[in-house]
């Protein structure tokens, strides 16, 4: 039935509404444009897709809305321009949103027709961004897995059912040598398993894999392309690529490093076992209960136990701490150790026999293979070092004692008081209970000088100390020491000594002589009432040294008394001079003043030495004295002045002072010597003369002094009548002449240079002395006071001089000096050996001491050259040499040795003094000699002892500073050459087989310079081998070498002293030093040399032990690093659980197994629980809690469960774990384990499900 128009219109409206609703709710963006490409309609999805509002797009050009970027505008414009004639279907295009972001779309566009003509165009846009992203993800994932396959560190092979190769990665090629072309299509079993047995194994594994569809792993061997066999670990499993293709995935892991590591671990274990037993230090293992678990051989030897004592399982404190105090300390340290403190300190423990041991204790925790922790205890014997420390303290105390006593006797004071103080220190040091010092007087008489008794000794019946000591006095003069070990065994002739010793309860005593030069002056006596024989200890020589020091004090006292005798004689002469004679220091403290001077000051009892003139002189007199001595200098040491002074009685007196300054080598004033003469009568006469001259002033123009003025160039501008008369000229004749006309050119140059050119505004005056030639031919000495006159700019314009003739005065002074020099020579001739000789070296005078010393008569000495008398040309040339002797510095001193005809060597100290004539020319040399042999011998002994001690201290400092044995040995050689004076020091270090691993040597070369060198390897000669075999110090005379010498072909000395370097039974090498002279080596030096060798051996032992420890630590660190690498590269999932912290650590395979990247998974146990399937979690946690508690004694578990992969599927895995450590309560503290996926067939049997 045909539809009516209304019905048709209604149907069309309904269809139109449906179409509009379809367009409005369409998921694709739809747009309609007019024939000018302006949008006339856009549905909501279009607006949402491109980020516009509907009102915003209506009327806009379509390209402005969807193609606003330059990179898509050209393509969009092409579509817009052709869409009215040609429909477009673009599956993949790019357009631009309003915010500028690109969007991937597919476009369907075409024309809109009405009545057969085009009226616009439509466009349908579908957002394909998610599709593009998925495609990109697929491409990236494919590239990732291909890259993972290719770059995997383990060899991977893909093959089919017939073992035909499909694909291999790069690691496979590197492992087996086969390329992809070699493998593709070939039977891989024939290539990789050439051995028949291996081929059967490979084919069997393939059959088992394809039949069970389960993964399996196997450790076996395979063959490389070059035919070599390598150990591998195989992980093989089949899987379906799709419904038609099946592939077998095989991973080969190279086990070469693993097998090597296992072998190395076995060797390391054996090494450490041997090291434990062979270690020179005592080592034991003990548990928390203090039971001994294990002990090495050194422990048994150190503490005196044997295997039969069965100390294993015993209480450690009862073994090593038998003393209650040691046991208390040991238990405290044990408690602190198990509380977490590492013990490293020095302790005292006891041997089996109860004797004490000084040890260094080190205690650290040590984990055994089964996981339990024990105490690793090391006892190092430090008894040798303690002994060395005690010896060092003893040597230092000895040095301080000797230094203190030497300083005591060198200081001024009464020698008896000094002896009483010193003997108490010495007696206490060497262990005496009584000490006495006696001196010989009047030939044979014995007089007590000092005594001392130990204050802890109870007072008893002390005998009278004034004993005759007949027997002891006779022996002490002949013997260097009188030693009586048992007082009851004294001979009958020593009854006096026996009575004295027994009265004091002495069990033994010793006496040392006191020599002053060649004369025995007394003796020191030391007794002991507590011990039988304390005199053989290391401190016993102190008494002998004490006697040497007090003997030197006697000698100094005698020499001082002899020196003071002529001084007293000269002093008596000076005291009764009528002139004032005084010597003062620059601060006016008195050194010497004669009777005339201190009576003038009103001090009848005399001026004590050191008193100050500032307290005795009048203020005005003191100021005059200060001004008088102020100009004294090294260039002008003498001044003459006249001053009016007030005596103690108030009377005024005129005193003429002649002052001389004494200067030290630095030019500093140290003393002023003044001679004052009372010229009051002369002054009164002068005053009367002045009054007379005043009356005749018109006749006499001036006094005798010469006054002139002249310009800087020397032109005279003024001269008084005295000056004119002196040169026989009138004033008008003098003026205009040069002031230097009456002196020669050299003198004029000197005056100008030294005096006139030095006048300045700051120093306008000076004084000079010059010789002038008078008209009558006389040469007279003049003294001039010069003053410069300057203008306002400081320029010298005039020089004014006041002069006087001092020729007579100087001649008188010269005569006085000549008399004084002759007198001093006579006085000084009374001391020691005195001789005088002329400038040619011929003797003109000798005293008796000189004749006695050289054993010659006086007439056989005089007029002979001194070199013939002394028999030593070199020493005599030094004495007779006149170089350096000047009038201003006439004395010099030096020392030298001299060998007398019997071959006896003596040391002499000479003082020389030049004797000059009035012209200052040297005429004679006076020399005074003093025999210094005994002083030199004592000084040499002290230097020798100090040299040995300094060398030992220096070596100990080197030992404490070095960790390198080679460098230490070389520096010890150089140090001994430098400090001990050895010309050669040789140290050889042994290597394996008894050969020399290295030789270090230091010495003094032919040119006197130090040498130091080191060579590798070498062999000892026969004598060197003999030293190596026998302990102790070996001395051999003659030119000897231990082996080839790196520095010198031969020694210049007459022998060597050598010993081996040994510590705790191990011989490290040899040390030898050169020795000089034919005399035997001091036993004390041999002992110190032996102790030095022990110190060096101990240092080499410590350095070697430290190097071994470092090497072992480095090896263990390398093994740990290899183990970490092995764990990280393991294909199975490895994990470690810290139960207390709740932290789980896992390797990369664990995370990649579940689809995570390494480091992406959480590290907590709660994260791990959240990935376990809810159905499996209760069963698994129940088993895990039982293992953690340890109630059933189980430490291992194995369980299968499912874990959630990152992609959302469940992976069935098998987890195996075990407890590696439990806490004190037995609860698990740390667990480790491995997780592997269950085979593919079982996996497929389980339906994959989403959680």
Image (spheres, grey):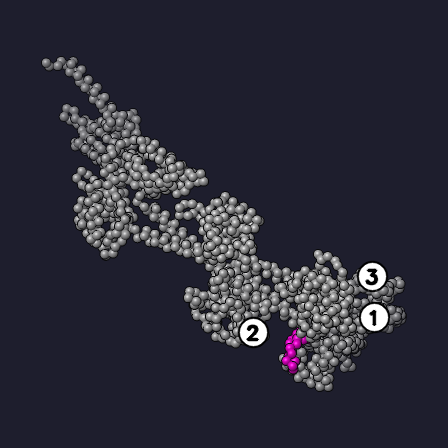
Q: Which numbered dot is residue 616?
A: 3
Quick check: 102 left or right of 118?
Answer: right
Quick check: 599 left or right of 1004?
Answer: right
Asked whether 472 or 416 is in front, the reply is 472
Q: Which numbered dot is residue 1076?
A: 2
Looking at the image, is 457 positioned above or below residue 1136?
below
Please report the bounds of the magenta region as a residue range. Answer: 894-912
Residue 1016 visible (yes or no): no
Identify the residue at image location x=81%, y=69%: 581
Mostly what secondary structure, the magenta segment? strand
Asked whether 1028 or 106 is in front, the reply is 1028
Disc 1 designates what residue? 575
Quick check: 703 left or right of 1213?
Answer: right
Secondary structure of residue under mark 3: loop
Looking at the image, is 760 positioned above or below residue 744?
above
Front label number (3 vs 2): 2
Percent across and percent down for residue 83 are: 19, 32
Q: Quadrant of the N terminus?
A: top left
Percent across and percent down for residue 819 are: 78, 77
């Amino acid at each position: 039935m045909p539809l009516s128009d209304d019905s048709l219109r209604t149907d069309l409206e309904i269809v139109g509404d449906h179409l509009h609703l379809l367009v409005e709710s369409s998921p694709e963006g739809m747009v309609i444009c007019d024939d000018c490409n302006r949008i006339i309609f856009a549905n909501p999805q279009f607006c949402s897709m491109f980020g516009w509002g509907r009102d915003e797009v209506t009327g806009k050009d379509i390209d402005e809305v969807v193609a606003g970027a330059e990179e898509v505008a050209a393509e969009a414009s092409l579509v817009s321009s052709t869409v009215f004639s040609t429909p477009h279907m673009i599956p993949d295009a790019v357009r631009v949103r309003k915010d500028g972001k690109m969007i991937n779309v597919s476009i369907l566009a075409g024309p809109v027709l009405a009545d057969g003509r085009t009226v616009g165009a439509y466009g349908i846009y579908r957002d394909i961004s998610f599709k593009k992203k998925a495609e990109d993800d697929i491409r990236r994932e494919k590239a990732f897995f291909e890259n993972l396959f290719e770059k995997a560190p383990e060899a991977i092979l893909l093959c089919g059912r017939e073992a035909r190769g499909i694909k291999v990665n790069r690691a496979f090629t590197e492992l087996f040598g086969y390329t992809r072309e070699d493998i593709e299509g070939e039977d891989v079993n024939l290539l990789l398993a050439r051995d028949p047995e291996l081929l059967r194994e490979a084919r069997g594994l393939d059959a088992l894999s394809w039949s069970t569809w389960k993964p399996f792993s196997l450790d076996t061997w395979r063959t490389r392309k070059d035919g070599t066999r390598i150990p591998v670990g195989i992980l093989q499993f089949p899987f379906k690529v799709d419904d038609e293709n099946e592939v077998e995935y095989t991973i080969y892991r190279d086990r070469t490093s693993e097998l090597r590591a296992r072998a190395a671990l076995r060797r390391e274990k054996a090494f450490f076992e041997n090291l434990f037993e062979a270690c020179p230090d005592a080592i034991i293992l003990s548990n928390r209960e203090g039971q001994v678990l294990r002990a090495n051989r050194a422990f048994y030897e150190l503490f005196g136990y044997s295997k039969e004592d069965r100390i294993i399982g015993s209480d450690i404190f009862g073994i090593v701490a038998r003393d209650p105090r040691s046991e208390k300390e040991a238990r405290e340290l044990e408690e602190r150790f198990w509380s977490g403190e590492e013990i490293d300190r020095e302790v005292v423990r006891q041997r089996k026999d109860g004797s004490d041991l000084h040890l260094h204790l080190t205690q650290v925790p040590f984990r055994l293979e089964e996981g339990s922790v024990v105490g690793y205890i090391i006892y190092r014997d430090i008894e040798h070092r303690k002994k060395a420390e005690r010896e060092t303290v003893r040597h230092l105390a000895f040095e301080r004692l000797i230094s203190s006593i030497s300083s005591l006797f060198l200081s001024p004071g009464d020698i008896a008081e000094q002896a009483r103080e010193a003997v108490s220190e010495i007696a206490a040091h060497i262990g005496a209970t009584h000490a006495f010092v006696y001196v010989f007087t009047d030939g044979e008489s014995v007089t007590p000088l000092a005594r001392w008794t130990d204050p802890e000794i109870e007072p008893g019946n002390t005998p009278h100390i004034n004993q005759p000591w007949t027997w002891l006095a006779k022996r002490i003069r002949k013997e260097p020491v009188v030693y009586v070990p048992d007082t009851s065994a004294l001979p009958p002739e020593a009854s006096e000594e026996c009575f004295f010793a027994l009265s004091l309860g002495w069990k033994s005593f010793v006496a040392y002589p006191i020599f002053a030069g060649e004369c025995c002056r007394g003796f020191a006596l030391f007794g002991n009432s507590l011990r039988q024989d304390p005199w053989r200890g290391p401190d016993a020589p102190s008494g002998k040294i004490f006697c040497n020091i007090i003997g030197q004090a006697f000698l100094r006292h005698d020499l001082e008394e002899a020196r003071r005798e002529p001084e007293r004689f000269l002093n008596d002469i000076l005291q009764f001079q009528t002139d004032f004679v005084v010597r003062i220091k620059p601060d006016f403290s008195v050194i010497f003043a004669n009777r005339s001077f201190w009576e003038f000051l009103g001090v009848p009892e005399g001026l004590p030495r050191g008193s100050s003139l500032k307290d005795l002189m009048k203020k005005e007199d003191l100021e005059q004295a200060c001004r008088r001595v102020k100009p004294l200098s090294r260039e002008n040491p003498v001044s003459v002045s006249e001053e009016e002074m007030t005596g103690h009685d108030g009377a005024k007196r005129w005193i003429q002072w002649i002052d001389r300054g004494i200067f030290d080598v630095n030019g500093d004033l140290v003393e002023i010597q003044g001679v004052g003469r009372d010229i009051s009568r002369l002054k009164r006469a002068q005053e009367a003369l002045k009054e007379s001259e005043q009356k005749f002033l018109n006749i006499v123009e001036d006094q005798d002094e010469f006054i002139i003025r002249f310009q800087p160039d020397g032109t005279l501008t003024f001269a008084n009548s005295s000056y004119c008369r002196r040169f026989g000229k009138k004033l008008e004749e003098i003026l205009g002449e040069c002031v230097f006309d009456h002196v020669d050119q050299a003198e004029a140059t000197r005056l100008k240079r030294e005096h006139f050119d030095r006048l300045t505004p700051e120093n306008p005056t000076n004084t000079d002395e010059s010789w002038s030639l008078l008209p009558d031919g006389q040469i007279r000495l003049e003294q001039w006071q010069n003053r410069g006159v300057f203008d306002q700019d400081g320029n010298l314009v005039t020089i004014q001089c006041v002069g006087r003739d001092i020729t007579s005065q100087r001649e008188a002074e010269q005569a006085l000096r000549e008399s004084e020099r002759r007198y001093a020579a006579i006085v000084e001739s009374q001391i020691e050996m005195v001789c005088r000789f002329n400038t040619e070296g011929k003797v003109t005078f000798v005293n008796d001491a000189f004749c006695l010393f050289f054993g010659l008569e006086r007439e056989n000495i005089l007029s002979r050259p001194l070199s013939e008398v002394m028999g030593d040309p070199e020493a005599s040339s030094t004495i007779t040499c006149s170089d350096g002797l000047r009038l201003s510095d006439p004395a010099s001193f030096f020392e030298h040795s001299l060998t007398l005809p019997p071959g006896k060597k003596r040391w002499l100290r000479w003082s020389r003094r030049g004797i000059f004539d009035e012209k200052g020319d040297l005429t004679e040399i006076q020399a005074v000699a003093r025999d210094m042999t005994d002083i030199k011998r004592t000084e040499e002994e002290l230097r020798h002892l100090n040299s040995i001690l300094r060398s030992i201290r220096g070596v100990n400092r080197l030992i404490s500073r070095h960790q390198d044995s080679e460098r230490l040995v070389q520096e010890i050689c150089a140090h001994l050459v430098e400090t001990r004076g050895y010309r050669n020091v040789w140290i050889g270090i042994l290597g394996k087989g008894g050969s020399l691993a290295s030789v270090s040597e230091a010495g003094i070369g032919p040119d006197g310079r130090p040498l130091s060198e080191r060579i590798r390897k070498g062999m000892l000669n026969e004598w060197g081998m003999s030293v190596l075999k026998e302990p102790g110090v070996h001395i051999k005379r003659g030119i000897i070498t231990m082996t080839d010498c790196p520095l010198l072909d031969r020694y210049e000395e007459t022998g060597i002293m050598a010993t081996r370097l040994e510590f705790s039974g191990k011989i490290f090498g040899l040390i030898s030093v050169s020795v000089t002279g034919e005399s035997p080596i001091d036993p004390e030096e041999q002992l110190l040399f032996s102790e030095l060798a022990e110190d060096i051996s101990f240092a080499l032992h410590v350095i070697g032990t430290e190097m071994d420890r470092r090497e072992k630590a480095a090896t263990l660190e390398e093994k740990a690093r290899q183990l970490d690498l092995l764990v990280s590269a393991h294909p199975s999932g490895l994990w470690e659980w810290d139960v207390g912290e709740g932290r789980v650590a896992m390797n990369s395979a664990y995370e990649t197994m579940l689809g995570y990247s390494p480091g992406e998974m959480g590290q907590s146990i709660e994260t791990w629980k959240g990935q376990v399937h809810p159905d499996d979690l209760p069963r698994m946690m129940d088993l895990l809690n039982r293992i953690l508690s340890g109630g059933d004694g189980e430490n291992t578990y194995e369980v299968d469960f499912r874990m959630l992969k990152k992609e959302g599927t469940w992976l069935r895995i098998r987890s195996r774990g075990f407890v590696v450590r439990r806490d004190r309560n037995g609860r698990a503290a740390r667990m480790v384990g491995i997780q592997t996926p269950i085979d593919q067939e079982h996996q497929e049997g389980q339906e994959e499900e989403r959680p």
